[in-house]
Amino acid sequence: MHINNKNRSLAVSTVDQKSETIPADTGLLAPNPHTKFATLFDEKNPFLPERGGELQQVQVAYETYGKLAETCDNAILICHALTGDAHVGNNPQQGDLPGWWAEIIGPGKSLDTDRYFVVCANFLGSCYGTTGPVSINPKTGKRYGVDFPEVTVRDMVRVQHALMQQLGIREIAAVIGGSLGGMQVLEWAVMFPEMVRRIIPIATTARHSAWSIALNETARLAIMNDPDWQKGNYDKQPLRGLSLARMIAMISYRSQPSFQERFGREEVDLVKLNGSARILNNQPPRFQVESYLRYQGIKLVKRFDANTYLTITRAMDSHDLSRNRKPLTDVLSNISARTLCIGISSDVLYPPHEQQEISENIPNAEYREIISEHGHDAFLIEFDQLNKMVSEFLGN
C-alpha cells in the first residue's frame, strides 16, 4: 500500500542540537522520536551506486548514544542486519523503548557510552528512514519501488562513511555488527582501513555462499509469485509472499535443537488460535511450530516492505570481499584492524567455519564462539556471552 507520511512531524535533536522536524518521507514506519536525519550528496555530487543509476540525495536515519570526544576518535559504529533499524540502544530519560541491542549499549556495558560515542545508521535501501524503495523519487514524485537502483554492501558502507564524515568523526574505535551487519563491518576494514582501529564481525561471512543465496532466492520468489506483488507496483503489501519469505528465513535463523526443544510435536489449541495464523491459508495450522512461523510472517508484514526485502537480499548476495579484488585470502591478509570474529555454535545460515576462515587469514585476529542452541539469532539473544567477549576485546 502507498503510505502517506506527510502528516508526520516530530521534534528531534540533530547533531548540532538544533530542533528540526522529521522529514516527511521517512520510509515505511514512523521512526523513534529521537532518530536523527542527515542529507548526503546533492544534484552536483550525486551518489552513484556500484552497479549503475544515481541518487541525487540520500537521506540517512541514525541514532547516537554517548558523547563524541574532542579528538573525534571514540566512535563505535554499529551495522544492523536485514530487517533491523537504527534504534539500537536506549535513552530511558527521553522515554525511549529499548532498541534491539540495548543490552550491550550503555554505561558499564561492553559498548560503554561513558567511554564511546555509539552510532547506528539505517543502511541504504532500507525502509526505516534511509533512502530506499519506499522513498519518494524526486524525478517522478512517486515511490521508487522496483525502480530503486540495485545496491551492494559496498554502497551501504560508502553512505555510512559519508555520514561519519558529516558527523566529524576522524577515526572509528570499532565497527561491529552481526549477519548482514558483519558483512558491512568487513567491508569497512577493506575500504577504509585508515579510519578503523578494530572490527567485530559476528555470525557472518566473507562471501555469500550458494546455500545463503539459495535461501534468499527462495524467499524472493515467494514474494514475486504472490499475485499482489504486481511486478513490484503494488498498492498494498503482498502479504502472503512477504510472510512466506519471512517464514523461510526464520527456519535458517534458528536451529533444529531449538525448534525441537521449544515446539516438539505439540499441537495447536484451535480454541486459542490467533486469527492471524489463518491468514496465509484457510486451513489452520496443526502444530505449534507451524503457528509460530505464520505468526512471525504476519508480524514482519506489519513493519516491512516487500520491494525492500528484494533489494536488501540481492545486496547480501552481492557480498564477496574478493569481488573485483585479489583472491580472498589476500584481501583478508591485508586487513590491518584488530579483529574479533564471533561465531555461533548452532548457526546453520553462516556456520562457525566461515568466521574461523576469516579469523585465520586476518593477521591480527582472534576467534570466539557463542555456545547456544538458538542458531543464527543467538547474537540477538545471548547477551551475557556477547557482552563478555566484546568487553574483553575492547579492554573495557
Image (cartoon, rainbow, N blue to C red):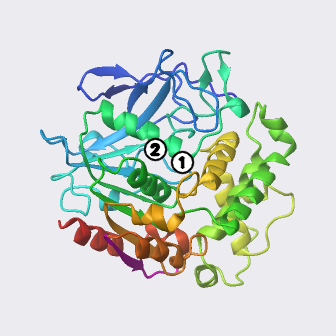
Mark 2 touching mark 1, by CB under 8 A? yes
Disc 2 versus disc 1: distance between alpha carbons? 6 Å
Which numbered dot is residue 153?
1
- The residue positioned farthest toward the left in the image shown: 70
Please report the residue visible at 48 percent of the width from the left and 15 percent of the height from the top. Answer: 44
Q: Quadrant of residue 141?
A: top right
Tell me the quarter of the image containing the C terminus. bottom left
User: Which residue shows up at 73% across the image and 39% down it?
Assistant: 237
Residue at 52%, 38% in the rendered image: 124
Q: 129 or 212: which is nearer to us?
A: 212
Tell me if I can see residue 225 in this picture: yes
Q: Which residue is mark 2?
A: 157
Q: Is residue 125 magenta?
A: no
Q: Is residue 161 left or right of residue 76?
A: right
Q: Amino acid at mark 1?
A: Val
Instruction: Please give the range of residues in magenta.
Output: 364-374
Amino acid type at image mark 2: Val
Residue 380 visible to an observer of this rendering: no
